[in-house]
Image: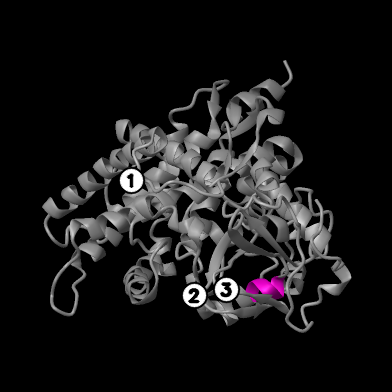
Amino acid sequence: MSTAVSTTREETRPDAVARPAPGPQGHWLFGSVGDFRGNQLPFYERCHEEFGGVAAFRLGHRRLMLVTCPEGIEEVLVTKNRHFRKHYMLRLLKPLLGQGVLTSGGDHWLRQRRLMQPVFAKPRIAGYGEVFTRHAEREIGRWSDGERRDVHADMQRLTMGVAAETLLGVDVDGEAFEIVHRAQTEITEDFAWRFQQPLTLPVWVPTSRNRRFRASIRALEEVVYDVIRQKRERPAGETDDLLDRLLAARDDDGRGMSDRQLRDEVMTLFLAGHETTANALAWTFYLLGRHPHVGGKLREELDRVLGDRPATAADFEQLVYTRRVMKESMRLYPPAYAFGRESVRETEIAGFRVPKGWTVIVSQWVVHRDGRYYDRPLEFDPDRWTPELESSLPSYAYFPFGGGPRVCIGNTFAELESALVLATIHGRYDLELSDPDSVDVWPSITLRPRNGIPVAVRSRESRVESQEPE
């Protein structure tokens, strides 16, 4: 990677006078598109290694800045968050998510966020514990000892079912899941392609790619509008989930949400509400498959805390090692591996000038693997998560759920769900990786395994029987 300026890592001090950030020079016309297309994660890592906590680069006509120092990330997300808005990459999802809480801004976003917040309060989430465990047991009820499966697809079905029941009050399984899963995969592939292009045609232009993209959105919309129809037909007060709150919401003039407004929020909740947790669980089972000793230690805790009974929300605090396993998994494989903001005015981040209209990217993938904050940063070691480590980490040295006013609204929900699902499945099954070297990291909308994670499922009963002397 060639440099455009001679600034060294030592010179990129956060307290320096605001000046242009260093970064790769790239091609005279396309900038760093070639390196970025190859794989954006190694590209981010090289920028961090060569230029330090702030690096500027160009993708075609777009100007971007990668921020990987915790103090700079805090400025972007917290202290100077009003200097930024959602960036162009997220706006690529507007045809899919519309004006949902993930893509909207201003007063509309604030109103919707406040409307949803009570559903994600801790006492309410604790009541979902039985739902999390029940869906985990329903999923493994499909499994047979010795069977080969794609655990990523299984976790998507599981977490989609949880999101549908807890947030929308409906059951989504069977054909509906297959429709959503197929459409979501196609949209993810399309986003990854568009993200890497210097220029793309608007989605309304009737190219073959755009037609496939719109067809995938229509397939999802059919499922979503059916959910809205089912809810509108139910008597008021029969259920009390997030969709009920959206249906009951009224503007100052007494008007409720249109089906289109509901569609945008349901689409966001339905997709974002399960995708990241599914990825976190899938990557956790991948890591456990590569580190059997961690799986053994995890099982010891499950035996001690749970015995033969199902996990409940009341067990969460006692499942210390279970939570550490999830925390370490999301350190190494954060489902939200990077996200961006667009500057709405000229500002300064970590001592470097950010012109108006630039996209600032902060990357969990890079920061979570930085040896300045984590000893042996590439090793999977849940035991590292001691209270001493957590108290010593700078703010935003670990931020799997983002931060600032737009921190993930479902972070507590996701933490409880992932812990109870992991406890339920790992207490019953070992998931042996069929071909560990075939698992490939795919940074698209979220951090997915490109071709799934193939495993062989081994029940605990058969494992114990095989270890008994004849």
First of labels 2, 3 by sequence position: 3
Q: Residues within 10 Å of mark 3 (few under 14, many from 20)?
A: many
Gap in angstroms between the C-alphas marked 2 and 3: 8 Å
Examine the rendering and report whether any part of residue 373 can be seen: yes
Q: Which residues are magenta?
A: 70-74
- Image location of residue 436, percent across then percent down: 70, 30
Q: Quadrant of the C terminus?
A: top right
Quarter of the rendering containing residue 208: top left
- Residue designated by label 3: 77
Q: Residue 18 at what x, y percent from top left?
A: 73, 81
Magenta highlight: main SS: helix
Q: Of the residues shown, which amino acid type is indicated by label 1? A: Trp
- The circle drawn on residue 269 is none
The local secondary structure at tag 2 comes to helix
Disc number lying in front (2 or 3):
3
Q: Type of residue at label 3?
A: Leu
Q: Residue 69 occupies which quadrant of the picture?
A: bottom right
Q: Estimate the spatial distance between the alpha carbons at disc 1 and disc 2, rounded to whole Å.
A: 33 Å
- Residue at mark 1: 204
The answer for how far apart the CA atoms under marks 3 and 1 are is: 33 Å
Q: Residue furthest top?
A: 470
Indicate which disc residue 405 carries.
2
Look at the numbered disc 1 and give the secondary structure of its residue.
Answer: loop
Say which of 346 and 273 sits in front: 346
Which element carries disc 3, helix, strand or loop?
helix
